[in-house]
Image (spheres, rainbow, N blue to C red):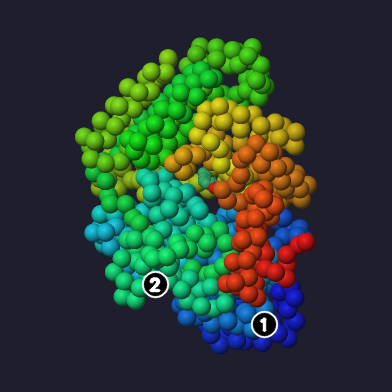
Amino acid sequence: MSVPPGVSERDFQRAVARFESVVGAEWVFTSDEDVALYRDAYSPFVGEAQEKVASAAVAPQSAEQVQEIVRIANEFRIPLYPISTGRNLGYGGSAPVLSGSVVLDLKRMNRILEVDERNAYALVEPGVSYFDLYRHIEERGLKLWIDCPDPGWGSVIGNALDHGVGYTMNPYRDHWGAQCGLEVVTGDGELVRTGMGALPGSRTWQQFKYGFGPYLDGIFSQSNFGVVTKMGVWLMPQPEAYVDCTVEVFGHDDIVPLVDHMNYIMNTGLQNAGTNLQSPIRFAAAANPELRAALASSDPAEIAKLNAFARERGVPFYSNIFKFYGPEEVVRAQLEYTRRRLSSIPGARVRDGAFYRFPITAEQKATVRDPQDLGIPTLETFSIGARSNFAPATRGHLGFSPVIPMRGEDVIESQRVFQRVLQEFGTDVALLVFPQSYHPRTFVILCMFYVMPDAAHNDAVRRTFKRLVEVAAEHGWGEYRTHTAFMDDCAAAYSFNDHALRKLQEKIKDAVDPNGVLSAGRYGIWPQHLRKG
Ligand code: EUG
């Protein structure tokens, strides 16, 4: 049995015995084979000494048990690492930031406490997955949609706390934005309800976010100040219909008006959902070295070659899917307006896409292109890369995920800047994906790094990733979220006024978790005794 850092074997054994008295011996895991299940299957340190691993795990059933475990951890200074379903793959999975932490596994707390159809919300525990909530709603025939990220097995709470994203409308697709009301066990073992939940007998905990006084919910996301034991989430009333269209443009500079129109359409609420921006010419370039070189160049002669290729072969330089949810006559009108507006770009083509009236049939459900667009959770995303027939040697992927302004010029610049870094370090370490409108006013670039069971390859992944973080910061781009291996690097870039934000985060950390027992190092926040310099 391994022991957490800074804890004696004797104290650890006493703490484990106390954990067992709280949750029952069968819910405390100390054997090597049980603890190995908490390894990060996508770790960029896989099989190396630096891989971050747990020493044990404990799985409580209630908020009261969480409080007792946190108090015991305070008594023995045991570092805990809470996880919900532990499926944050690409960003650390179920493995701790600080090796040797005890995973506080909340999977047994999987109760759906309330789903309210009239006011469209749910109150859930951390072990509730998107599949669970979807099934619960389906079984009862409620006219509500969830918004889910790509992997449906993830936790509704865990994904929101990590600022995860989905694919239906605003505000639902911003999973933290759709959160309303928390119950939290802070690092000192106190049980707190935020917002209207602080009012005993409150009737609006899941409807009114702000409560009274300072609005604190945000400090419990991407942090390590508390263990969230309940969360309210706003659900989307089932729309009458869905329609989408794909706009295709054929010139290198057409990205500028394309994105400007997209801004207008999104910011006026005409289209209140994400889009799917792509650059089809890039796929053509994958098999054509000459095109690939031209794409990396800013030489006007090279760009002219690309424009000629796009127009002659009918391969769009850029395409974007616009999606509409609502009454049929409304969404059709929104689509027609979008068609008219985007047709002002010379040469633009607008293709009709899918149309659905809800509820859809089982047959339609089986053939829908992107089930997540309709709030249907799946695991299909795992067929595109990791552990699939696409690239058998790839064990997993990591997301380098900087936030980019929603402007065509920035799309071009960021692709060039990041592609240059990849070329310098080796293009076989990562796939640079085109910017996506996961949030209403910015793009996220997902640079997908391949993790392999190969230390030399993973070393290149780590070096390239760290360089990308630096280069991004030099251009004013920062990450929205990151893998546990790079949290210090990404947080360090947010350095205004000599890291004043981190200092404030540390003051809060010391106040609510004075012994630093929760998730040491998460999002770059370390407890006092582990701070460097
Ligand atoms: C995706 C992946 C991410 C993310 C947001 C969306 C979707 C992949 C690996 O990180 O942060 C298809």
Q: CA distance from mark 2 to mark 1?
A: 30 Å
Asked if the residue at label 1 sits under 8 Å from ligand 1, the reply is no
Residue sitting at x 42%, y 65%: 213
Image-quadrant location for residue 508: bottom right
- Above or below residue 405? Residue 512 is below
Image position, residue 354 (x, y; %): 33, 34
Residue sitting at x 67%, y 50%: 497
Work out whether residue 91 or residue 227 is closer to the camera in this orientation and state it.
227
**Which residue, given by chain and number where applicable, does mark 2 sit on?**
198
Image-quadrant location for residue 50: bottom right
**Which residue, given by chain and number where applicable, does mark 1 sit on?**
76
Image position, residue 272 (x, y; %): 36, 40
For marks 2 and 1, give the one nearer the viewer. 2
- As drawn, the label of residue 179 is none
Which quarter of the rendering shows the C terminus? bottom right
Instruction: Left or right? Give the position of 299 relative to 107.
Output: right
- As drawn, which residue projects farthest toward the left? 329
Other residues around mark 1 within 10 Å, as few (<14) / some (14–19) / many (≥20): some
Other residues around mark 2 within 10 Å, as few (<14) / some (14–19) / many (≥20): some
